[in-house]
Image (cartoon, helix red, strand yellow):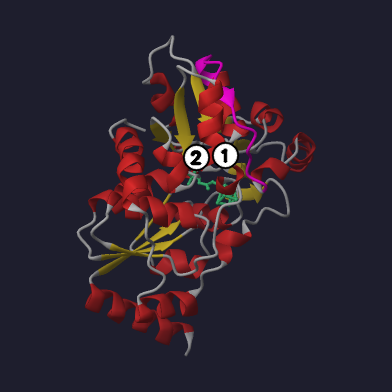
Amino acid sequence: MTAADLATFIDQRKKELNAVILAHFYQPPEIQDIADFVGDSLQLAVQAAETDADIIVFCGVHFMAESAKILNPDKIVLAPVLDAGCPMADMVTGEQLRQWKREHPGYAVVTYVNSSAEVKAECDICCTSSNALNVVRSLPAEQPILFVPDRNLGAWINSQTGRGMELWPGYCPIHDQLTAQEIKEQLELHPEAVVVVHPEVSPEVAELADAVRSTAGILKYVQESSAREFIIGTEEGFIYTLQKHCPDKVFHLARSEFMCQDMKMIDLEVLAKALERREHQIEVPEEIRIRAVQSLQRMLAIAP
Ligand code: 13P
Ligand code: SF4
């Protein structure tokens, strides 16, 4: 089938099933173009919580589809590729978090949504990189906090809020590779450019940036900025989104290799097959879901 045939099939099948297609900003261009909604992980969680579709097809990585299922136990949530995961989410298990909590009685636990349902079930409130500062500020100033799993996002939150949260040593293998040297080299090549990075980068890199934002935050920043040229410190798929929304601006990826392989596993053929066969259905054990949903709902009640 040609790309046009696949797109026609996807559209028809979507209507037959009353399905909605949600896609993360890091998805390949053809998936972003065919999706009903493209966004960052917070925007996608909000869409998943509010949709009246019967089936949610989640083009992203596993924890995102799992969050949609936690919020919608009565809907079918499909992940077109079950193996598309987030290596950072796998850096802490429910048992490891339970042990860490035993070692820190009286601490609240804030969990980045890039985590499993079992880890979310062990925490007090979730956050994404869009709302992390407001989530942490919503906790009483004297409340000690454990933060899992991203040490880089956690360090950035600490630097902005002055809260000495204890940080789990997880990290995003893609964002963590970006070095301060690479930013300096890009700045030598493009001295007029404004540097905007995702908070999953290391603290040394965040310190060199003009702005640190979630993906949706980077888009908003770029749209509102009077600058024309930007050095972007996040996954390469996002350059497509930026260029689509801001065709008159120039974007330089902060490093030549900036790809999350897990985000590139879905293409039109895979998406068509997922809709045709209604696969792969995400399931979350109910005793985990009822605890995990509370931490997601507490997060959704807080403004980004
Ligand atoms: P956003 O919340 O900015 O979409 O980030 C999700 C993610 O996985 C970044 O690597
Ligand atoms: Fe996970 Fe990093 Fe990929 Fe985001 S870019 S999904 S944090 S591995």
Residue placed farthest to the left in the image? 52
Determine whether the residue tagged by mark 1 lies in a helix, strand or loop. loop
Question: Residue 292 sits in which quadrant?
Answer: top left
Q: Give the residue pinned by disc 1.
A: 198
Q: Nearer the viewer, residue 292 or 23?
A: 292
- Where's residue 11, x and y in %? 32, 77
Residue 224 shows which numbered tag?
none
Q: Give the residue pinned by disc 2.
A: 214
Image check: 205 left or right of 96? Answer: right
Q: Quadrant of the C terminus?
A: top left
Relative to 187, say whether 289 is above or below. below
Q: Main SS of the magenta segment?
A: loop
- Mark 2 vs 1: CB contact within 8 A: yes
The amino acid type of the residue labelled 1 equals: His
Residue shown at 19%/59% (left/top)? 52
- Where's residue 241, x and y in %? 49, 55
Q: Is the distance from the Cβ of mark 2 to the nearest ligand 1 atom less than 8 Å?
A: yes
Choose the circle earlier in sequence order: 2 or 1: 1
Q: What stretch is highlighted in magenta?
A: 160-173
Relative to 88, say whether 18 is above or below. below
Q: Is the distance from the Cβ of mark 1 to the nearest ligand 1 atom less than 8 Å?
A: yes
Q: Which of 142 and 32 is in front in this view?
A: 142
Relative to 2, say whether 103 is above or below. above
How many angstroms separate mark 2 from mark 1 (CA)?
A: 5 Å
Residue 148 seen: no
